[in-house]
Amino acid sequence: MTGIGLGLDSLQSKQYLYEIVGSLKDPLLDNKNARVKNILVVDDAAGLVWVVNLGCIAMHVMNARVADLHEPDWMAFDMDPQTGEFADAARAGLALRKILDEAKIPSFPKTSGSRGLHLFVPLRAGHTDERVTAFAMAIGEELAKREPKLVTTAHAKSARGQKVYADAFRNSYLQTIVSPYSVRRRPNAPVSTPLAWDEVNVRLDPARFGIRGFEKRVAKADPWSEFKRKAVRLPI
């Protein structure tokens, strides 16, 4: 199971909370300077409802399971347009897909539920978070090299200008990303929606995927139905 990035040390009735949803303490975080010592683990519907009842709206998850927090299940890219225009994120995402396709690496897009576009790559077992992050950063640099007027990998926000920030750091240890189908805390409660690649274009308005009426969307074919089956081993 993946963990939701929520610190628990300040919550009341923590023991009862742990009995409902479970928790995981990582020894690398167990020091006096750590801000977070416990990672919430949700593995059933009851636990999910409990987290929602606590006031958690957007579900941010890690890319690893409890058995090994250093072995990612996926590699992710966050296309974050500094213009605030989804069209820019779509252009960057399509360019990134081309690079991944050239390397025979499958990718699955979804809206971020805000202005960005996320790309996920399903991974076979055996990768480390450090190597996946390094590989994702190298792909991001290649994207910025091919699309210098559109994409940047500059970590400092002040250095990004109006470009799309290709964020590969979502793959680092203990980093999180909003999960597929998570609702976002924004007007009209938009949903981070899995997409088919033929839906990704500059005309797509991610705001159309709001929680109201979303059951019609999920009643259709799942564009990520092949996610696990297409898991790959990265050339690293």
Image (spheres, grey):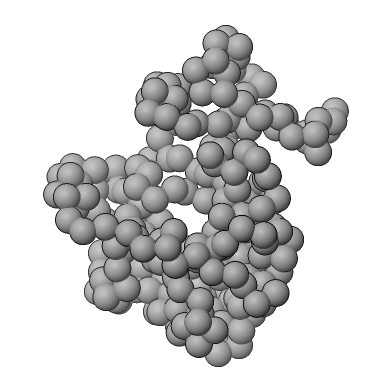
Q: Residue at x 34, y 47 (%)?
A: 181
Position in image of residue 210 (x %, y %): 24, 48
Position in image of residue 198 (x %, y %): 27, 75
Position in image of residue 175 (x %, y %): 63, 49
Position in image of residue 137 (x %, y %): 66, 71
Q: Residue at x 67, y 45 (%)?
A: 69
Please state if 141 lies on the left or on the right of 207 as rendered: right
Tell which residue pokes out farthest to the right in this image: 32
Q: Does residue 202 appear anywhere in the picture?
A: yes
Q: Residue at x 32, y 59 (%)?
A: 225
Q: Residue at x 44, y 48 (%)?
A: 179
Q: Quadrant of residue 46?
A: top left
Please state if 183 lies on the left or on the right of 21 as rendered: left
Q: Is residue 8 above or below residue 69?
A: above
Quadrant holding the C terminus: bottom right
Of the pair 72 and 171, the residue shown nearer to us: 72
Q: Does residue 92 appear anywhere in the picture?
A: no
Q: Quadrant of residue 155?
A: bottom right
Number of marks: 0
Q: Is residue 30 above or below residue 200?
A: above
Of the pair 93 and 116, the residue shown nearer to us: 93
